[in-house]
Image (spheres, rainbow, N blue to C red):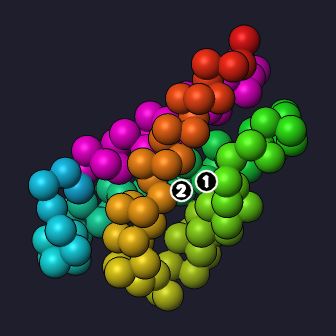
Amino acid sequence: MKRDSRAYLLDIRDNCDLILGFVKGSDLKGYKANDLIKSAVERRFIILGEALSRLKTLDLNLLGNIPDASRIVAFRNILVHGYESISDELVWEIIVDHVPLLRAKCDELLASVA
């Protein structure tokens, strides 16, 4: 089944929700101590980055409305191919500082995409 831009935006938003749900009530120390949560979060970042990569092939203009889209895709590639260099502190910073903004941007774009 062929997917459209809206489906990828929903994937991104849903994975943002999952990431935020996985870490709710936690802090960096708790995150670093829980390999299960770290694995779940990293998996969701991989899916999120892949959805952005696929969105790029469908609608480059829409992708241009997502701040740091290329950096998110690059982060996905690091998670997949450079896993040994992953910093828990960096992942946590992205969760706290960027995921809520990305989620809000997806809601905004979903409202404008037919």
Q: Residue 14 in magenta?
A: yes
Q: Is residue 108 above or below residue 41?
A: above
Tag 2 secondary structure: helix
Amino acid tagged 2: Ile
Q: Give SS at disc 1.
A: helix
**At 73% across and 61% down in the image, what residue appears?**
70
**Residue drawn 53% across the image and 47% down it:** 102
Task: Classify 69 as above or below 56.
Answer: below
Number of numbered discs present?
A: 2
Q: What residue is drawn where x is 50% and y is 79%?
A: 83
Residue at numbered disc 1: 49
Q: Position of residue 37 (x, y in %)?
A: 24, 60
Dots 1 and 2: beta carbons under 8 Å? Answer: yes
- Judging by the rendered image, the residue that carries numbered circle 2 is 46
Residue located 57% across and 39% down the image: 105
Q: Which residues are magenta?
A: 1-22
- Picture quarter with the N terminus: top right
Whole-number angstrom distance, CA of label 1 to CA of label 2: 5 Å
From what the image shows, is residue 106 above or below residue 82? Answer: above
Q: Is residue 11 visible?
A: no
Dominant secondary structure of the residues highlighted in magenta in the image: helix
How many neighbours does mark 1 have within 10 angstroms: few (below 14), some (14-19), or many (20 or more)?
many
Q: Could you say where residue 52 lies in the image, as x and y percent from the top left?
A: 68, 46
Three-letter code for the amino acid on which mark 1 is drawn: Gly
